[in-house]
Image (spheres, rainbow, N blue to C red):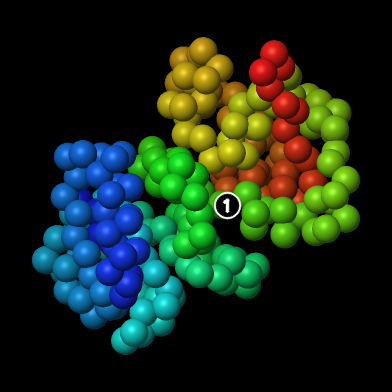
Amino acid sequence: MKVLVVDDHTLIRAALHAVLKQLKREAVIFEASSGREAMHIVEEHPDISLILLDINLPDRDGFSVLCELRDRYATIAVVILSSSDDQDTVKRAFKLGALGFIPKTTEREVMLNAIELVFSGGVYIPLEILEKTAGPRLANKPVAPDPLKGLGLTDRQIEVLALLMKAKSNKVIAKMLNMAVPTVKNHITVVLKALGVATRTEAVIKVGKMGWEWPPKSGS
């Protein structure tokens, strides 16, 4: 597996390099400090699997790099790194085809989960951004899981959705809930249908706007 980290700060590249090696010790990791250098590396290694892309680059707008990548290398997963997490920036990133958005203030453990989720084919949206989307009134007034049950979801499916909201991958959800990965996928399919959405990202955004908070773990 090949991964490219694009950021003009050496310390950030080093930190991300360490995170990636913790997840995939066998990964070959390239580093670029500019958009031009990044595109040159991708041209030489079009089989790169994942790119972690800062949107504030010294030579060009990171969004323009994202657009070029989507046009020329559509199979490469791109996750945006940013010191800003305003709604317009996040929405623009996903509209242009990013599969994740990671604020640079993200804690290491959360970043590990986010990157692992994208590695497994998922999409990562940070929880704090969902809370902003929900708005202060909804965020301060959690909604009980009853509205979700009104959609016909079982307790188990609500548990799966709760872990989905925490950016857990199918494999991690299966392990935490002691079930097979295909069973998790089936539950997610039911959840998406009940919510009237087509993707995990849309489900997370919709539930976030509802202001729903997952129930605490029983017995813990």
* Horizontal relation, residue 202 to residue 106: left or right: right
Tag 1 secondary structure: loop
Q: Is residue 183 visible?
A: no
Q: Residue furthest bottom?
A: 59
Q: Which residue is mark 1?
A: 126
* Horizontal relation, residue 218 to residue 173: left or right: right
Q: Residue at x 27, y 54 (%)?
A: 17
Image quarter (top left, top right, bottom left or bottom right) of the N terminus:
top left
Q: Residue furthest left?
A: 44
Vertical comparison of 108 with 90: above or below: above
**Front residue (pair 69, 170):** 170
Q: Is residue 36 visible?
A: yes
Q: Residue at x 41, y 58 (%)?
A: 79
Where residue 163 sits, quadrant-wise, is top right
Q: Residue furthest front?
A: 11
* Horizontal relation, residue 7 to residue 208: left or right: left
Q: Position of residue 132 (x, y in %)?
A: 72, 59
Q: Position of residue 101 (x, y in %)?
A: 50, 58
Vertical comparison of 29 with 54: above or below: above
Q: Position of residue 3 (x, y in %)?
A: 24, 54
Where residue 32 sits, quadrant-wise, is bottom left
Q: Residue at x 85, y 49 (%)?
A: 140
